Image: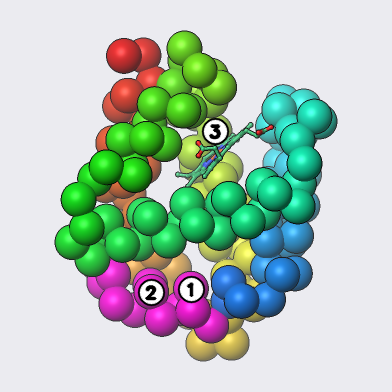
Amino acid sequence: MINADAVFQSYGRSCDKPVFFEDFYSNLLNKSPEVRAMFTNTNMESQRALVRGGVLWLIMHARGMPDTKIRMLGESHSKKKMNINPMYYGMWMDALIETLYKHDPDFSKELEECWRDTLRPSIDKITSMYSD
Ligand code: HEM
């Protein structure tokens, strides 16, 4: 079920702790050596701040904001630019959910479904721009 308000509140309970994004990237990088390799030259401190904002754009889009920022992500992650294959977004989402289970004290199976359903349209938009 899409429930952008529940997701927004869940994110509010989680994203203020810096350890949330440390755990998110350690979960994500542990899922695949290919993903780990993408971040070898990345300043992870900046990256954690960037993705904190990026997740918020996805939530705000579900709350009615125009898709300008989503399109920017679609472009930067496309084949021509950073070349992030659409196959990796499932891992990205799973890593996010695992991190939420750890850090949102009110997390549940129902909230997991809300997160997945609420972010899906934005992620579909981003991956649909991969080959443009
Ligand atoms: C919808 C989910 C995602 C969001 C919200 C997101 C967000 C961001 C943001 C905000 C940046 C900074 C550059 C920019 O503004 O484009 C970025 C860079 C990057 N993202 Fe993503 N991302 C997502 C999915 C992924 C996935 C699935 C991967 C690969 C597993 C990935 C790999 C990268 C890499 C390699 C960079 C560049 C790091 C560097 O500068 O060295 N992203 N992402």
Magenta span of residues: 1-13
| In magenta segment, residue 11 | yes
Q: Are marks 1 and 2 in contact (CB under 8 Å)?
A: yes
- Outermost residue, bottom side: 106
- Outermost residue, right side: 40
* Residue at image mark 3: 88
* Residue at image mark 2: 8
At 31% from the left edge and 35% from the top edge, which residue is drawn? 71
Per the picture, the main secondary structure of the magenta-coloured stretch is helix
Q: CA distance from mark 3 to mark 1?
A: 22 Å
Badge 1 element: helix
Q: Nearer the viewer, mark 3 or mark 1?
A: 1
| In magenta segment, residue 4 | yes
The answer to whether residue 90 is left or right of residue 35 is left
* Residue at image mark 1: 11
Q: CA distance from mark 2 to mark 3?
A: 24 Å
Q: CA distance from mark 1 to mark 2?
A: 5 Å
Label 1 Cα neighbours within 10 Å, binned few <14 / some 14-19 / many ≥20: some
Q: Quadrant location of ligand 1?
A: top right
* Image location of residue 75, percent across then percent down: 39, 26
